[in-house]
Each structure stands twice: as structure tokens, then as C-alpha cells.
Amino acid sequence: AQSVTQLDSQVPVFEEAPVELRCNYSSSVSVYLFWYVQYPNQGLQLLLKYLSGSTLVKGINGFEAEFNKSQTSFHLRKPSVHISDTAEYFCAVAFNFGNEKLTFGTGTRLTIIP
Amino acid sequence: EAGVAQSPRYKIIEKRQSVAFWCNPISGHATLYWYQQILGQGPKLLIQFQNNGVVDDSQLPKDRFSAERLKGVDSTLKIQPAKLEDSAVYLCASSLVLGQPQHFGDGTRLSIL
């Protein structure tokens, strides 16, 4: 069965500390991988994507993620967080290249502690 | 570039009433998606259009939900009659072509009393 798992529902981090948000997926086919951020009362904004090529992907706002095919993971990292990074982060996977249907994880709420 | 526009932003109705949401995608985007996001969960795809044709509606509760995309541009999603479990944020997204990232609107928050 194809699924997406975000292991942490909430992650508190001190300001200027590094953070890693974890995402694992289960699939028997090749995938496209995405991270989206959602600020309160707003829609989702694309942070970064992996379609092919280099497994280390850089996105907006200083975030990056690494695709690990053997571990079926796509963890999101930032070396130093800021108060403005407080938001909900969603990992999403496209399992079927034919229709680009996205399956989202349940989200990780990142809280930055001053 | 104007983003994905959705209206209304908020809607409160009683159960068994009807409601409709509107979405105008980014100009030129052929693919349009409707998602349901229940509190504390990730978005779940309800229906996907390619131009004015349906690509995937496998998770749309067709006994009460309907959607259309006339002329391949804007779209409406309707619920009739609404149930308490339909309380959620309804997100519209669009993409230029298949394989390109999806751009999301700010959503419509629906509360059922």
C-alpha cells in the first residue's frame, strides 16, 4: 500500500537552533516528493520538491531536504530557525505520474521558542 | 502573477443545508484540484480536473458532493446536503501542466452547526 508518514506531530525548537522534520513513504513505484508549509488561515506554499537528479534539494526560506531511496525518506532540514518559521509543515508524495495526485502526510507543527 | 482565488473565506451553515464554493485558478493553469482538510489532518484530494474533464474523483462522496469546471477555467464545489463531518477547510489548487507543482488558494473554512 502507498502511504506517507510524518513521524512527529509537533516539534518545538529554540530560535537559531537546527531542525529536522521527518517524512517517510511507502511505495512500489517511483515517486515525486514535496514539502509544503501552511501558515495560520492560509493555503499551502511549496517549500521544495524532488522530481529527479540530485538527492539534496534546496528550497525557499533556507530549507533543504534529502531524498533517501533506500530508506524511503525525505526529511526536511534547516540549520538555524527563526520565529517566522512557526507553521505547519506537510510532506506530500505523488505516486502516480499519470495524474499527479498528491498524498499528504498528517503534518508537523513547528513551534519556535524565543 | 495573481494566485488562486477562492470564495467565500468562511461559511457557517446548519446540517442538511446546501453550500457552494468557488475557485479561480492561476491564468493558464490546465489542472485544478479540490482538497478537503479536516482539522489536524493533511489535505485529502477530492477531485482533479484537467481542463474541463475529470481525471480523478475516487475520493469524492458523490452522494452529496459535486464539482464542475465549465469552460476549463473556474470551478465550483457543492455539498448537498451537508453533514457535521463535512466541517473542514476546502482548498483549491492549480498547476500549469502535469508534473508542475500545485499552487494553493487560501481555502474556505466551512463550519456545520
Image (spheres, rainbow, N blue to C red):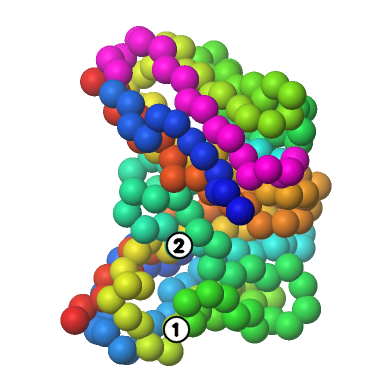
Q: What crowding class fits label 2: few (fewer than 14 Cα within 10 Å), some (14-19), or many (20 or more)?
A: many
- Relative to A26, A44 lies left or right: left
Q: Disc 2 on helix, strand or loop?
A: strand
- Relative to A68, A15 lies left or right: left
Write the start and end of the magenta stretch as one range: B13-30
Q: Report x, y in % for residue A83.
A: 28, 76
Q: Chain of mark 1?
A: A
Question: On the image, numbered disc 2 is attached to which residue?
Answer: A37
* Label 2 vs 1, first from the N-terminus: 2
Q: Amino acid at mark 2?
A: Val
Q: Amino acid at mark 1?
A: Lys
Q: Is residue A84 above or below residue B48?
A: below
Q: Report x, y in % for residue B56.
A: 70, 34
Q: Which mark is residue A68?
A: none
Q: Give me the residue at 36% from left, 58% from top.
A: A39
Report which quarter residue B71 is drawn in.
top right
Q: CA distance from mark 2 to mark 1?
A: 13 Å
Q: Is residue B100 above or below residue B65?
A: below
Question: On the image, numbered disc 1 is attached to which residue?
Answer: A78
Q: Chain of mark 2?
A: A
Report which quarter residue A8 is drawn in.
bottom left
Q: Nearer the viewer, residue B86 or A83?
A: A83
Q: Give me the residue at 50% from left, 45% from top.
A: B105
Q: Disc 1 on helix, strand or loop?
A: strand
